[in-house]
Image (cartoon, rainbow, N blue to C red):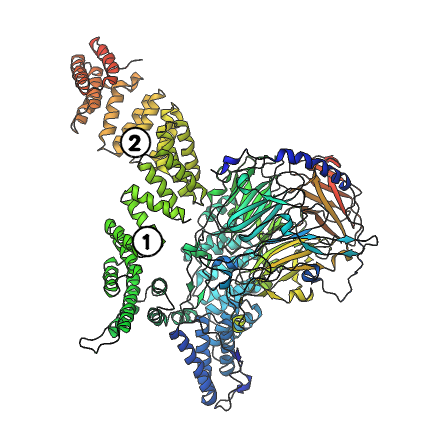
Amino acid sequence: MVVPLALALASHAGAVDRGELVPLPLPNLSTMEDATRQRLELLQGRVSALGRSGSDGELAEAYGTLGMYYIAHHFNDAAEAALRSAALLSPNDFRWPYYLGFVSQMVGDLDAEGAAYARALELRPGDLPTLLHLAELHLTLGDNERAYREFQRALELGAGEAAAHAGLGRAAGALGRPDEAVEHFTRALELQPQATIIHYQLALAYRALGDTEAARRHMEQRGTRDPGFADPLLAAIEPLKRENVVEVVLEMAAEPEDHDDRSVVLFAATHLKGMPQAVDRIHQAIVDRTPAAGAPEVAPEATARNRLIRARLHLALASIRLEQNDFGGARNHVESALALARGMTEAMLMLGYVLDKTGDLAAAVECYSAVLELDPGNTDALRSRANARFVLRRDREAIADLERLCGLGLEGDGARIRLAVAHLRLGELDAAREGYRAALELSLDPSDAAQVHHHLGVIELRSGSVEGAVEEYRTALALDPGLVAARLDLGAALGRLGRDLEAAEALRLVVEADPDNIRARLGEAEALASLGRSMEARQRLEEGRQAIPDSVELLEALARLLASADDPEARDGERALELARLTLRAGSSPGRLETLAMASAEAGSFDEAVRLQQDLIQGLTWEGRLDELPRLEANLARYRAGLTCCAP
Amino acid sequence: MRFDLANSDTTAGRGAGMASRCEAVWLLLLILVVAPCAAPAEAPAAARDIFEDRAEELGVDFVHFAGVSGEFYIVEISGPGCGMLDYDNDGDLDLYLIQGTMLGPGKSVGDAISPPQAGHPLRDRLYRNDLKIAQDGTRVLTFTDVTEASGIRADGYGVGVAVADYDNDGWVDIFLTNFGPNQLWRNRGDGTFEEVIAAAGIDDPRWNSGATFLDFDRDGLLDLFVGCYLDFTFEKHGICRLPSGIPGYCAPEAYGAVTNRLYRNRGDGTFEDRSLKAGVRHEAGKALGVMAADFNLDGWMDVYVANDMLPNHMWINQGDGTFANDGLFGGTAVNADGRSESSMGVDAADYDRDGDEDLFMTHLGYQTNTLYINDGTGVFDDRTTASGLGPPSVGRTSWGVRFFDYDNDGLLDLMTASGDVFVIEALARQNDPFPMRQPNQLFRNVGSNRFRDVSDTAGSVFELSEVTRGLAFGDVDNDGDTDVLLENCNGRARLLINNLGSANHWIGLRLVAGAPPRDQIGAWVGIHRKGSPVLWRRVRTDGGYASANDPRLLVGLADGAAVDRVEAHWPDGTVEAWTGVAVDRYTTLARGTGSRVKRGE
């Protein structure tokens, strides 16, 4: 409906012919919440009233304010009409053509945008935002020379230099001057390194100059943030958007027939962020609705409704607390909500979430179960319970929930992967494999898909297929080269296959990515030793000792290598003995005793070596570990013969 | 598992029988004129619109149903595409229109804000072209709804269509993307189709969008690339409200990005999912339009994916079964300002006549559409502004798109289909139940790499405001100009008959190989004329937004009636040339009938 509001104005107190004002198309406010709608209706009414009796200045202000509100609420055509009237009534007010320019920009009316910003600039020639908007517009229109001049003027204004330099760079690029573009973009980035979008523009300029290396380097740094500059008029719109959001929440909470509990929570969580005053107002609304002691009784239905509304307001407050990561505060509000409305599933769900977040997963599971008892179809509760049970390693219960989720087609959020992991943890390899394969049918992001392939590799390994495991690990690494765990397992599997060179290479990459990874360091040294590169193995273990001095595993491996390396050059009996003795400080074990025996032999103490080896054989025999005896006895024979360990 | 059925194909016997029939057709087609010399009985009068919507008059009575119930499911504003294909091999283009269904758990059509068309089940529909051309060239064009007889029962929530003869039996097949499981309809060659997606091993229950058939490994079999849009489910749905409480559709940012699929054709009726090995699953996106082309002219087909709000992907074929996304360095992932745009439709063609394929993408209203020109090596420059295509596109949210030469002047023009995704307040005030209507646009290539918006003079169909998504292009009346099928979301389909093009000279080509003859999707064809730039065109059915097009090449020659040579670069890299190819008519060029040319000669 278009109401020719201005035309309807019978008499007025201003100089401008009110008949020339632009008819105001009244937006459809019916789907707005009451508070915002009332605000807009009030402003519309004010325009109407001032149209009859107000001065031009008063009416311009009323139209302009209404236009700003229309902008805030995305009623662009109404905003345009209101602002045009404001500009007619107050032609020297810079604000109205500026906002008109912005509205025209929003609706894509480039001619109107240009005219409006040009008028604004006439009124305020040194206005940086207007100049920058105009320059942008001229770039869009292909008037690159003009855009260049405007950016140049903006630069001369002294403020917003980064934006001006970035604009100059783009204009220079469009004018075929990439070398100059590089200079401007570089300067813009110096001024505002956080304006990461400039990296791409700079990259294109370098590409045009043929410097592909610089181009690629800057493309890798590309982001989405623009160079900023102060724009006070647009900043003034922002608060108008959220002026009534608290009222909206209050209304939604008070209308359970029209808005469910979840909608209240979602809206509060989305729009009340960073509004501390909202908490006070909602809290006051709860207080206002709380019956005073001794208040006259009301009908039970009214009491129940009142309690429900207060409970919903508590939920809104809880959602604000959650946004602030204030789990204690959130829990208080959720518990208040539940005290007011015992069976409120949204509150129980939120309580479960809070408990989940604060580490009380078992209690969270109870909450989710309570929700499911009341509302068996509540898939949020089911999903949350499945995840909590999974984290608690209650795998059988988790599997039941996860299977139900998958059966409902709710396979997102990793349900299939968790299902497979739970099966894997229970040792159910076939079911786990099937679960992972099913997960791969989903659209996983590459890092998730990489993890799935890694786990499939583990399954292959456990099923006895080392080759299959290698293939899965390699697929995982193709998807996510940074997946260290997969590379480590790949190295280990390659070692098992005797592909020592590949194993050593894989494990070297793991060590480089994760210098504290003892398993990788040990594996790499072992692979190098197997390749006959004992000196390198020794060097790696020495490096490992330096990097992780507390590692007994590395100590033991080095001692053993020094006592038993294939390459005599790599052996050092005295040092081996010293290190082997050190390992015993961390406790004795058959392996360490065997190393000590090897070291003793290497150091020439064959009697000691024989004694240690005999004790070891006796102990293992007593433990029933008979399969290790042939090797130990072979070495015992060598020690008795005055030979060191394990010579080729 | 999906590939368990890989060896269960039973096409061998049927294919053998079909071959003999096709060979007969083939003999008729070989270097023969399919359509008589264009002498349209209805010569376009000067005052006639360039394009006229004649859908209803010709028997195309399709009305799309989006299943809108006020729940603001993002699915309901995202489709549909549409298609042109010659399913019965009778030499004229039939029409395929995609239907929606009611959306949302527990919803029935009674909940729809706009009820579906009465008397028609909510299914896709296939319209057979019954074109009759008399001896004197008079054309009688009519369409018959043959959906029931065809056996096609596509009653999912339809999004897009891709067509090609994937099983090389000489009959074009139909692949449908849906919100929900896709469908592959294999053409039996007797006017009926069978649904074979499970047997083919390419089932995908996600929300798929654009798709393209391409022979990425040059083995003579058409593979399939399928785009996937969003990780949306009803479970994840929520109504997004403005701070004022006004409800609306959530932006794509509300839902996760997903990965696309590349299926390799095994040649036995089944496909192998090569997405992972080929590398295309390494990067997620929000794919809408998808198309194949050879951007770096290395003879291997690449794939371009238009992503909504995320950088676009330009998958460059490495020639070894893998692809690398070179969108960023190639300059087509984001616009020249470095911004990701909401790419919907995409098309590629050599609009600047320099022998490589350039790219054009359609976007949201607050962005411009974007034109990227190729330097011949797969490196592109954003030339939107210089082309004149930027400003006219601001304020329109556009989807379907195609480079085509509507006036046969030898320069590729553009048409874009528009319809918003936000409520347009002025329409809402008029109680429009689907207030997102916008007019479509026609841009004429005026030479010197510039375009002019000629929508105002192109006919009353460009004055209509509708929510158009898919556009399909082809010469439905075989009169030597390009007609357009457009499908509106929640509205009537339109068939825009071109009244202008055949006023200029043209050459129509169908590039085929094998017995039975199959369209050589991916072939790169040059029309050589004395004193004029070579006009390069690719044989393709893809492009635009989730739609399928005429595989024939219709190349405008303006007032020049002579073509020296036609050169075809076949998908396997070999080259042949023909001389003496007639103009102002369609000619089928079969592989092996031209002179062999060494590449680069």
Amino acid type shown at disc 2? Arg
Tell me the quarter of the image containing the C terminus of chain B: top right
**A482 is higher (above) or lower (below) than A28:** above
| Label 1: which secondary element | helix
Nearer to me, A597 or A70: A70
Q: Measured from the top left, where is residue B261 in percent x and y?
A: 51, 43
Q: Check disc 2 and report its element: helix, strand or loop.
A: helix
From mark 1 to mark 2, how far is it between C-alphas? 40 Å
x and y percentages locating residue A36 in the rendered image = 40, 74
Residue A230 place in picture, x, y as percent = 41, 66
Q: Is residue B440 left or right of residue A66?
A: right
- Same chain for the residues at labels 1 and 2, yes or no? yes
Q: Label 1, on which residue? A: A381
View extreme (right): residue: B136
Of B7 and B244, which appears nearest the observer? B7
Image-based side of B397 in relation to A348, left or right: right
